[in-house]
Amino acid sequence: MKKPAGFTLLEMAVVIAIIGILVASVTPIAVSWIGAYSATLNAAVTLDKLRYSVERIERELRDVKSIGGGYQFGTLGATMTTFTQNSTGRTVTIAQSGNTVTLSYSDVSGVTPVLTNQVSSLGFRYLQQDGSNQTVDPTLVRYVEISLTLTQGGQSYSERTRVRLRNL
């Protein structure tokens, strides 16, 4: 008589139990890897936003219109600045509004001017020719220092840069 081929119910139950144990032990490791990947990705996206925003603000500030030995600023605020562009003649406003930074132009309407979100602070310092003394007089401003801090998941990311104004 021929012996039947196949698995017994006991063998299948043992294999299923072993697979279940393996899955239960590997799942927490896989979940932590996915969490670490997600946190790293979120941090990288936040850093990209931070770098892009600061570079964009720098680029806009380098185009401040010069007039009679000074620059054409409308507002020299700690968290907001308004100025006229040299290349287009339009007024540019950069300001913090809640947790966003807005970049708006006088000749563009109907567009939400959000430059970045996740903002915990935006700051401007206006410096004289020596690079250390602050001023609120547009005719004396030669440098603008920008400080921007974004927050992601309880972690803060900051960048500060100094822009030397052109076209004088």
Image: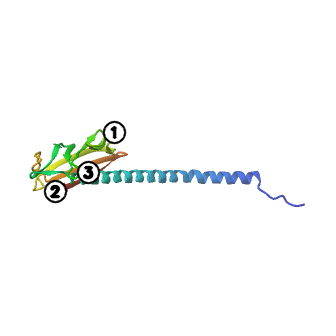
Report helix, strand or loop for mark 1: loop
Q: Residues within 10 Å of mark 3 (few under 14, many from 20)?
A: some
Name the quarter where the N terminus is drawn: bottom right
Q: What residue type is disc 2 on?
A: Asn
Residue 110 tag number: 1
Report helix, strand or loop for mark 3: helix
Report helix, strand or loop for mark 2: loop
Q: What residue type is disc 1 on?
A: Gly
- Among numbered discs 3 and 1, the one appearing first in the sequence: 3
The residue tagged 2 is 167
- At 52% from the left and 50% from the top, the residue drawn is 28
Q: Is residue 19 left or right of residue 7?
A: left
Residues 75 and 144: in front is: 75
Q: What residue type is disc 3 on?
A: Ile
Q: Position of residue 103 (x, y in %)?
A: 28, 45
* Contact (Cβ within 8 Å) of mark 1 with mark 2: no
The residue tagged 3 is 57
Q: Position of residue 72 (x, y in %)?
A: 15, 47
Q: Position of residue 36 (x, y in %)?
A: 44, 53
Residue 11 tag number: none
- At 88% from the left and 61% from the top, the residue drawn is 2
Residue 113 occupies quadrant = top left
- Among numbered discs 1 and 2, the one appearing first in the sequence: 1
Q: Residues within 10 Å of mark 2 (few under 14, many from 20)?
A: few
Position of 110 relative to 42 (above/below): above
Residues 37 and 55: in front is: 55
